[in-house]
Amino acid sequence: MSDDDITVGSAHVDLGSAFREMAQDEIRKAARKYLGDLTMASVHVAREGHAFRCSVNMQLGGNPVMSGEAEGTEAPIAFRTALAKVEKQLRRTKRELREDRQNRPTRIFTA
């Protein structure tokens, strides 16, 4: 997992290096916690009136892209809420994979 795999950006909002580093750290932690192999992640922040809208997209391994979007009074609040939505999807995917493995019939090979 390198920082090249995680893009943090905005068209009209100056995010600053502290927000970028915080977002990259939080995404790396979420990836390690759930499925591990981070393929790609992106964060985009936009200004909507007095609020910020943040969208987070993550792909781990060969799984589909997980997406979350949230609005908040500050960019970090919107980011954490959007990331929480993505983490919920990752939790469910991890549970499905774990349950699928347990429900497979065991094969008995005879020679």
Image (cartoon, helix red, strand yellow):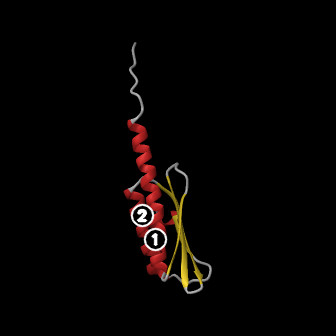
Q: Dividing the picture into quarters, in which one does residue 98 lie?
A: top left
The residue shown at (55%, 56%) is: 65
Image quarter hosting the C terminus: top left
Residue at left 38%, top 20%? 108
Distance between mark 2 and mark 1 Cα atoms: 16 Å
The x, y position of residue 104, in whole percent, is 42, 32
Q: Amino acid at mark 2?
A: Arg
102 w.r.t. 22: above or below:
above
Q: Is residue 93 left or right of residue 57?
A: left
Q: Nearer the viewer, residue 62 or 83?
A: 83
Q: Nearer the viewer, residue 48 or 10?
A: 48
Coordinates of residue 88 in the picture (x, y in percent):
44, 59
| Disc number placed over residue 39 in the picture, else none | none
Vertically, is 16 above or below 29?
below
State the residue position of label 1: 81
The answer to whether residue 90 is above or below residue 3 is above
Query: Disc 1 residue type?
Result: Thr
Furthest residue in direction bottom, as rendered: 50
Place of residue 27 in the rendered image (x, y in percent of width and height, measured from the top left)? 44, 65
Quadrant of res 12: bottom right
- Of helix, strand and loop, which one carries label 1? helix
Check disc 2 and report the residue beneath it.
28
Mark 2 and mark 1 lie on one chain; the one further toward the N terminus is: 2
Q: Residues within 10 Å of mark 1 (few under 14, many from 20)?
A: some
* Helix, strand or loop under label 2: helix
